[in-house]
Every structure is written in structure tokens, then in C-alpha cells.
Amino acid sequence: MILDLEPPFLLIKPGNEEEFYRLEGEDSDWEYLDGRLVMSPASDRHEQLFGFLMALLWAFLDERGGGAVRGSRYPMRLDERWSPEPDLMVVLEEHRGRMTQKRMEGPADLVVEIASEADPAFDQKEKLPRYLQASIPEIWLVDPFARSVLVKTRTGAGYDTATLTSGRLASTVLPGFWIDVGWLWQDRLPSTVACLREILK
């Protein structure tokens, strides 16, 4: 039984879209990736980083407007075999029509994934290729184990790629939003209020 497993673990089993969305109605922890149901519980550090980035994005959009942010229990349906649940996604105002009560119909504008302890490379191996295929404009893969952020930004010719371990990471999708990558590696994450003041200056 799943309840007998101690994290970190990664579970993958065959499934279909109907089963996934039935489970979603029960507030499950499964994702639907390439016709498979996938589960990996979040670690405490993962949840800290998620909460920190969610708070910054939520407050920034609340102050400046321009879109909405959603967390990891909101599927992003790309097709009948893919409904990933990014840790964070930003949907710009002009694409709010893609948002329904239960899921996002089509790609978000900014996707953030935070590596899990069970398989830190999983998002890059399994999800990133599909995100690129979906032409998501901006993708951040946060790896707290390597202390790096892989950033993919869509251009007219494809994608620009950067790997940051420190310094300012400025969003191209959300003008004015940025983070200091060094904030993410502090043992105790900095105050979101203090960071937001810096961002909004």
C-alpha cells in the first residue's frame, strides 16, 4: 500500500485520462504524464520553496495585475495523454479563458517546477520536453540539490537557455517580476514581505 511507503519515493503506474480526472475529484496526489499516473510526495524543503515563490507571485500579481498564479493541484491539460500539474504556473490575463474550475485547457505562460528528492532530474527528463513541445513561453526548473535554476525562454528561433546559481532572474513573461536566485538557497528562506518590497521598487 502507498501508505506503507516512506518518502522519498516515486510511483508510476499505467492509467488513462478518465481515471486521472476521477482521482482528481478526490484530491489525489497523482499527475497524468504521457498516459501514466505518477506520484512523488513533496519534501519539507520543496514545500518551503513552493510557498515562498507562490507568495511572491501571488502578491506581485495582486499588486500589479496582469494574470493569475496557480499551484500544483491544478492540472494543465495539454492533450489526452498529458495533464501535468506544475508546482506553479502563471496565466496571463489574455489567456484566462483557458482556465476552468477544474483545470487549465492548454499551456500556461510561465511554469515553475521544483525538483523532488525522489528523483531530482525527473522534471527535466520527463516534463521539460513536453513543455517545450507545448511552446510554453517561460519555464523555470528549480533544483535545490544542485542549487541551480534552469531557465528556458521562448524566442522566435526556439528557446534561449540559462542556468543560474546566483544573481537576478527576471521573468520575460511578467515584466517587473524577478527573484534573486540566492534567496532560494538560504537555510532559512528570507521574508517574502522584504523580498516583495525589493521586487516592487
Image (cartoon, rainbow, N blue to C red):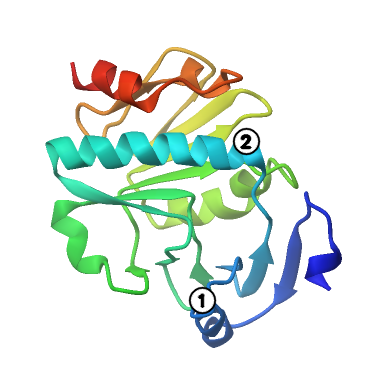
Residue 149 on image: x %, y % = 52, 28
Outermost residue, top side = 167
The earlier-in-sequence mark between 2 and 1 is 1
Residue 98 seen anywhere in this rendered image of the structure? yes
Amino acid found under the numbered disc labelled 2: Arg
Q: Quadrant of the C terminus?
A: top left
Marking on residue 81: none
Nearest the camera: 73 or 76?
73
**Residue at image location 49% in from the left, 14% down from the top:** 166
Callout 1 secondary element: helix
Residue 107 on image: x %, y % = 35, 59
Residue placed under numbered mark 2 in the picture: 45
Residue 193, compared with residue 158, is above or below; it is above
Q: Are marks 2 and 1 in contact (CB under 8 Å)?
A: no
Residue 154 seen anywhere in this rendered image of the structure? no
Marking on residue 24: 1
Residue 153 on image: x %, y % = 36, 36
